[in-house]
Image (spheres, grey):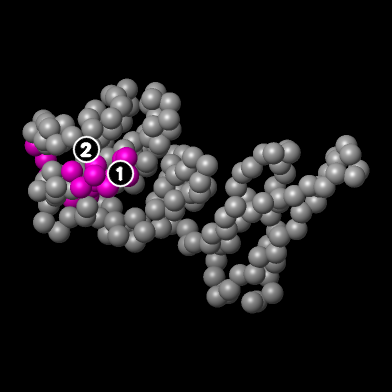
Amino acid sequence: EDGRRFQASGSYLHGASGPLVVRLDGRGSDAVTIELSVRFEDLHDTQAWGSVEVTYLVAHARNDLLDLFDEMGSDKGATVRAGTGFPHLYGVVYHQLLQPLRDEELNLLEIGLDNESKESGEPADAPSLRAWRSHFPRARVYGIDQHDFSFLDLDGTTTFQGDQGDRDDLKRFIAENDVRFRIVIDDGSHAPSDQQVSLATLFPAVEPGGWY
């Protein structure tokens, strides 16, 4: 509205895809108008036509947790796509809810540690767990996954291999660690039956006033 113009550009090979991110720092306008233009170069067949598909367009206010998810490579951020889908942008809401707890001593549990391992069966990284570890410097961070993530070398972090839909696994996790949680994040199988089992089994281990 104030007449300022910003320009961002991206270059992609035929058939490729990727995010094009425009960051506007500072305030001064309540509205942003976006114009898209496309130019095709190096077409070998001058009769050929090209096309570009915009699969999603999202605008959001930046915050340090969202940026941390992006830095760690988690689809909870704004740039890493969830499989063939879109970035989840969970960090927008997580920041609003959890920012007041950032400097507190607390226990945080995340269920489901790596989306890629669901497909490959071979865990390689736990991006969001690393993001939580960095964002809550005084927290003890726990992670549950059906795959073995004991290879992670993160201070103040404990991983547990188990099935979130198995009550015995979850009860064993609680018994082995003997903790109560301020924050529990279920980002596991997303199957309602598993979510119900996890909620029923883990909710008693959530502190009064905690988040599940």
Residue located at (62% from left, 50% from top):
20
Magenta includes 162? no
Residue at the disc numbered 2: 165
Q: Nearer the viewer, residue 113 or 8?
A: 113
- What is the secondary structure assignment of the residue under circle 1? loop
Which circle marks residue 24 in the picture? none
Residue located at (43% from left, 57% from top):
63
| Res 108 visible | no
User: Badge 1: few (under 14), some or many (20 or more) residues near its Cα, within 10 Å?
Assistant: few
Instruction: Give, as a single range, the part of the protein colored magenta.
Output: 178-197
Residue located at (73% from left, 38% from top):
13
Q: Residue 30 occupies which quadrant of the picture?
A: bottom right
Residue at the disc numbered 1: 191
As shown in the figure, which amino acid type bears the numbered disc 2?
Answer: Gly
Residue located at (11% from left, 46% from top):
205
Q: Are circles 2 and 1 on residues that touch, CB within 8 Å? A: yes
Q: Position of residue 98 (x, y in %)?
A: 29, 56
As shown in the figure, which amino acid type bears the numbered disc 1?
Answer: Ala
Q: Position of residue 152 (x, y in %)?
A: 32, 26
Residue lying at the far right of the rendered structure: 46
